[in-house]
Amino acid sequence: MKHKNLSILFLLLASILFIKCSEVKDDISQPPILEGVHPDGFAKMNSDDFHSNAIKANNWDMESCQKCHASNYSGGLTGVSCMDCHTQSAGPEACNTCHGVFADPDRIAPPNDMNGNYETTAKGVGAHTAHIYENTMSLGVSCFECHPGNVGSGDFVKAHIDGLPAEMQFGTIASSGLSTPIYNSDLTCANTYCHGNFEFTNDNPDLKWAYTEDVISGENFSPKWTQVDGSQAACGTCHLLPPVGHFNSGNDPEAKTCGLTNCHTNAYNEDGSLNTFTHIDGKKTLY
């Protein structure tokens, strides 16, 4: 009889434990959403507690956001979607979330810079607009002509959001010159093909008539990044008119007729403006 009572008691205890474990399992499947995790001003743009300031202080690491708002920022455990404000396809990881114009997905370069600066005298702003959006000398310069693309290092966004200062690593066209391009501490760049670091050798017997020296060379100009007054992009800055070593054809001193002498016809448009598709493309082109 005693053993029978013990068996009944054991079954009762096992049943109670089974029920309690089931309740615990159910609780785990729907964890509670924590309130008060962020300060009151976290979603208020002009607040010192605005979330961009917190992300900046965390060296722009977005993974902590994803832990609660889901990997695609759609809400996750919090039920609050970041995509309500960050409406572009990349959401908070869109380029112009951190730099450029937040409301314009086509303006992804400064101004504004990572610190909110918009003056061209700021290092983070400088001549971005002149190179990318208002470039009358060539096609708009790619981001990767000056900054590393971090291709092959994993997810692009996470690979390149690694804090300031932005790395400088000149690309294919900028590096087409005689020596390695460099970005100096005084905010000037040097040795870039784009600003006249080039030599075209007199090695084609059919073109020897165009040379007065062994090479036709550029001026290897070193422009200052934050000087955006037009003076550093004037014709003759990157190469003289005509360039050193080039015969003088007696052309217009502003070089607007270089393409009308049947030599560089594809370098200019019919209205005399530069053909941005062929000018500063890293190639020596005649006709």
Image (cartoon, rainbow, N blue to C red):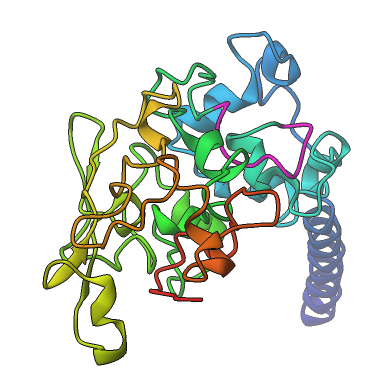
| Residue visible at 78% across and 73% down in the picture | 10
The stretch of residues the image draws in magenta is: 102-112
Q: In the rendering, at what x and y percent does residue 284 appear?
A: 38, 74
Q: Is residue 124 left or right of residue 86?
A: left
Inspect this view and state whether residue 32 appears: no
Q: Determine the image quadrant of residue 105.
A: top right
Most prominent secondary structure in the magenta stretch?
loop
On screen, residue 87 above or below 155: above
Q: Please name whichever residue, 104 or 188, is drawn nearer the observer in this view of the structure.
A: 188
Q: Position of residue 269 (x, y in %)?
A: 66, 57
Residue occupying the point 40% across, 17% down: 121
Residue 146: x %, y % from top left:
39, 52
User: Residue shown at 81%/47% (left/top)?
Assistant: 88
Name the residue: 50% across, 42% down. Answer: 131
Q: Position of residue 250 (x, y in %)?
A: 36, 51
Does any portion of residue 154 appear in the rendered image? yes
Q: Is residue 170 left or right of residue 285?
A: left
Is 249 in the magenta?
no
Q: Residue furthest left?
A: 214
Q: Quadrant of the N terminus?
A: bottom right
